[in-house]
Amino acid sequence: MLSKLLTLNEKIEWSNLIDKLPIDQQDIYYTPDYYELCERNGDGEAMCFVYEGDGDIAMYPFLLNSVNRLGYELDKEYFDIQGVYGYNGALFSSCSAKFLKDFSQSLLNYCREHNVITEFTRFNPILKNHVYAKYLSVVKMNKNIIVDLTNTEENIWNSLYDHSVRKNVRKAHRSRLTTTIFNNSQITDKWLNDFKRIYYDTLKRNQAENYYYFDDDYFLNITKLLKYNGIFFFVLKDNKPISCELVTYKNNKAYSFLGGTLSEYFPYRPNDLLKHEIILHLKNIGVEYFCLGGGTSKNDGIFKYKKSFSKNGDVNFYIGETIYNHKIYDYVCKKWTEKYPDISNKFSNRLLKYREII
């Protein structure tokens, strides 16, 4: 049995190990390129814990962050680990009980030896890898929506879509809305600026958290690092971009990543046309599962809108968390509560609440 830790200095080895996994386990959110995107964004140091034995392999990419650098005075340097923006959790070539147990013990040893105090992950609703995380406390969250693109276009239109989607797509066509598509490698500065303008406008309207206001470098890195794993979609009215979405994908799985719509054009139903054209395009390039994500709360308007594109596509979404060092974890949480009493209630249920620094 062998365990090792890869960094972005071993990107080729990291990529090659992903290719050794069954194809249904290979996913954009586990690639070194995507982790590099997040590391460059300041989200943490990209790592990939690898465990091999008897011809089988387990991979667990994560972001490593120092707790001390948040300003807590501690006796030594401590860390926490979490997944990237998107979906995470470990990937396995074997689901045997012994292999899963050995992997969990090996990861536990690593965390204890390297002063990791806590771990947080968002499991992948397509891969359903939460079932293998026996060492974590697994919590069911709000459901996500997945569109099954193995259906025929006719079945998608008539059976998966809600009647309101079909009606709104027709209205968008009557309003003479058009669409255009760019692969990440093709998009120009002009179109990228249009995307950011619509995206930022949507964030402002929805009062989004500051984290989601990604800077220019982030978008430039998307076009470079995810050169062959991303597609920009636009809806236009009179040649003006009014709605947009960036989709990330690898092999047969795709994810709605970032996007937005100018609110003054809502009456023309650009959102429905956009999702419809994305679904058709992804199906045509061989994608089988398109994850739309979920809402911000149970059965809210965002969730119901996404569900209208896949009436029976709601799936459970889970997070995983554990505390490796209760003494240090309790200490930093106590210090955080004392320093930020005004926001302590807002983030009290978050495992990594001590990272919410004003």
Image (cartoon, rainbow, N blue to C red):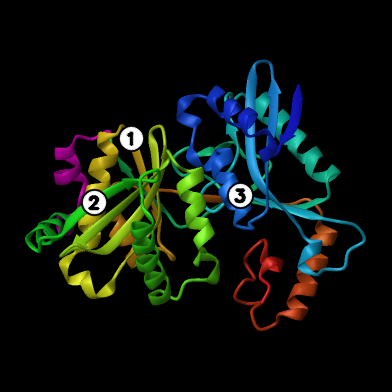
Q: Write the residue at 54% across / 38% down.
A: 129
Depth check: 193 or 313 in front? 193
Q: Report which residue position mark 2 lands on.
A: 180
Predominant SS of the magenta segment: helix
Q: Quadrant of residue 339?
A: bottom right
Which of discs 2 and 3 lies nearer the camera? The answer is 2
Residue 153 inside the magenta-drawn segment = yes
Which percent across, then down, holds residue 17?
Answer: 60, 26
Q: Are marks 1 and 3 in contact (CB under 8 Å)?
A: no
Which percent across, then down, holds residue 127?
Answer: 48, 37
Which of discs 2 and 1 lies nearer the camera? The answer is 2
Residue type at the position of mark 1: Glu
Q: Report which residue position mark 3 lands on.
A: 83
Residue positioned most to the bottom: 342
Which percent across, then down, holds residue 218?
Answer: 52, 57
Q: Residues within 10 Å of mark 2 (few under 14, many from 20)?
A: few
Is residue 191 shown to the viewer in this render? Answer: yes
